[in-house]
Image (tube, helix red, strand yellow):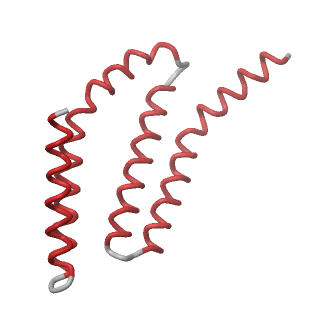
Amino acid sequence: MMLLFKLAVVAFVAAVLSLSLKKDQPAYAFVVSVCGAVVLIAAVVRQILPVVDWLNTLNGYLPGDGMACLLRVLGIALVAQLAGDVCREASLNACATAAELGGRILALLQALPLLQALLASYAGYLQ
């Protein structure tokens, strides 16, 4: 619970600094915003390691590289979302849309072998 309050304070300070700098020096406002996001992400990444360990224990339940595939898709989705948000912060909406679309396509391509195995299993069940 204490980590949540620390993250909220960091986000609030970054937002206030960014808004105060946006009028006079928009480049510095963008840098403050990105630095605040990096600090928040770094703090959260350390907290997600137990979840990744738990997902690795579930590796035996999915056939083949199922869990690794799901983790790759999750990573692609998070990076694409972050890239889109950074582009939107810089007022590059077209670039943000392209980054998110690229992330969706790459996630689908990474999940394709898992989807094929699922459909093959379902087809075998029907016969």
Residue at 21%, 65% in the rendered image: 33
Q: Position of residue 51 (x, y in %)?
A: 32, 26
**Most extreme residue toward the right, as rendered?**
127
How many marks can you see?
A: 0
Q: Is residue 120 left or right of residue 35?
A: right
Q: Is residue 4 left or right of residue 98?
A: left
Looking at the rendering, in which quadrant would you find the N terminus?
A: top left
Residue at 64%, 33% in the rendered image: 115
Q: Is residue 63 above or below residue 85?
A: above
- Residue 81, picture quadrant: bottom left
Residue at 48%, 33% in the rendered image: 69
Q: Position of residue 90 (x, y in %)?
A: 32, 74
Q: Is residue 47 above or below residue 76?
A: above
Q: Is residue 35 above or below residue 43?
A: below
Q: Is residue 86 left or right of residue 66?
A: left
- Identify which residue, 111 or 2, lies in the foreground: 2
Residue at 46%, 26% in the rendered image: 67
Q: Is residue 65 above or below residue 104?
A: above
Q: Position of residue 2 (x, y in %)?
A: 15, 35
Looking at the rendering, in which quadrant would you find the C terminus?
A: top right
Q: Position of residue 121 (x, y in %)?
A: 71, 21
- Identify which residue, 117 or 87, lies in the foreground: 87
**Most extreme residue toward the bottom, as rendered?**
24
